[in-house]
Image (cartoon, helix red, strand yellow):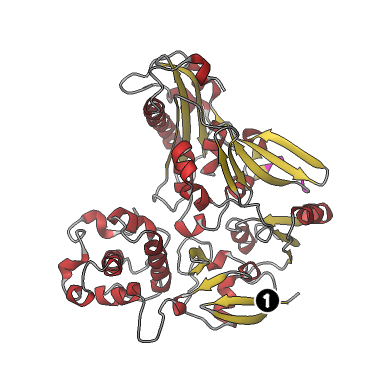
Amino acid sequence: MKQTIRLRVNGDTYEVAVPPWRTLNEVLREDLRLTGTKRGCGDGDCGACTVLLDGRSVTSCLMLAVEAVGHEVTTVEGLATARDALHPVQAEFIAAGAIQCGYCTPGMELSAAYLLSRNPSPTDDEIRRGLSGNLCRCTGYQKIFEAVRRASDRLKGAAPPDAAAGDPAAGGPAGGDPSGGGARP
Amino acid sequence: MSLCKFAYHGPETLDEVLALLAEHGPAARVMAGGTDLVVKMSRGQVAPAVVIGLKRVPGLGDLRFDPVHGLELGCMTRVSDVLEHPAVAAHYPALAEAAQATATVQIRNMATIAGNLCNASPCADNAPTLIARGASVELRSPRGSRTLPLAELFRGPGQTVLAPDELLLCITVPPPRAATGFAYLSLSQRSAVDVSAVGVAAGLTLADGRVAEARIVLGAVAPTPFVATAAADALRGQRPADEAFPAAGDAPAEACSPLGDVRASAGYRRKMVAVLVRRALERATARALADGRARTARPAEVTP
């Protein structure tokens, strides 16, 4: 029942023999060994398995690998353009301390990159809504929110990235806002 | 947690889809966005021998609008397509509200409106607004084509009138009308992601400052979307007050048949129906008035 398919992932073409019941998540992790993409709930609720398909965020656990044929898949491994040039979202996740256990991080970063690709100047509410399909089991939502705010500022060129680093007030106006505790609106 | 084994077909034309449906019928499941079907398969709730994927058929995802024919959603139109389309924002804001209430960003990028309807969950967010808006669905099979009012698609939880060889090909929503407004409001325990515990679509057309016609459709409070015809008809001839129609939700709250479950008790659902109907009518009224033609509405203009 296996069929040989060609997948485009992070600009590379992979030829893999997969049965049709294998999800994109399984094939990315187990066949292509791209384990940056996590598997969480398997129901599309937690967002740990988020990848971009033709630039749009999708949950790879709910997609058959055979249905990704002909599309461009981007995983967290493909977010940075080079080893020493992290995507602004990744750099700001580090600078803001937005990574705790790290399990949600790849999915969060792809959701953040997707949000900023479509809306470079999101409001606070739009950032929270943009991340509402990603759960952080450490509940570290506030730092994640701040990282996305800073990445947005950096992408707009509003703040020099290094000047903002290390300044806790630079994360934006949400510091003292109790409603800012969760990325889910 | 891996999926059951099945044969996958990825046809490239509608004729091929219909031929596969005719051949495999009851053994097959059609996969649009896959967000419901894959979950059901991974939980072992369904185990189709054949999966027919629609992604490779060109044109099925088209979203078309023109002021004469209205809005047409192909069966592969994604929830995010509806949310992002300027014509929906301009002429069908309640449809955008329902799309926004559906699942998460990632799911909206995969899931289709037609799939949300065909899964026939009583709490499907996109059904009440489309029914209130008078949508119809075209069902296609090798035997021919039939068009039904959307409300007639649903038979019960998870059940539709679709025959094993039929495909829901497209959804048609009538064109916008003057002095008319619709709104969709939903409640869920944990905001955006969770399944709606109550969903209410309401709409009305005003003429000479009075209600000429109204629609109220409830989701998640009956086995299928609940069309509250009597309550809507009772609004006819009424004038929107400051609070629009304070008691308009009382009768539908009584008439619906909600279950109590992990998301909400039956009693809470009833109480929230009363509240949400009132609020949805307020918002619909504001939209109808904002249409600008309400105060000078000519009767000829408000009938389709």
Helix, strand or loop: magenta stretch: loop
Indicate whether A106 appears above or below A134.
below
Q: Is residue B163 magenta?
A: yes
Residue B197 visible in the current orientation: no
Q: Is residue B75 magenta?
A: no
- Magenta segment range? B160-164
Identify the chain of the residue marked 1, using the numbered disc in the image. A
Q: Position of residue A184 (x, y in %)?
A: 35, 56
Residue at 31% x, 53% y is A125
Indicate whether B238 appears above or below A5.
above
Q: Position of residue B93 (x, y in %)?
A: 45, 39
Q: Nearer the viewer, residue B153 or A160?
A: A160
> In the figure, is residue A37 to the left or right of B150?
left
> At numbered mark 1, what does the secondary structure look like: helix, strand or loop?
strand
User: Looking at the picture, which amino acid does disc 1 mark?
Assistant: Ile
User: Which residue is farthest bottom?
Assistant: A83
Judging by the rendered image, the residue that carries numbered circle 1 is A5
Q: Nearer the viewer, residue A77 or B263?
A: A77
> In the figure, is residue B33 to the left or right of B142?
left
Q: Position of residue A1 (x, y in %)?
A: 76, 74
> In the figure, is residue A141 to the left or right of B35?
left
Q: Position of residue A177 (x, y in %)?
A: 20, 56
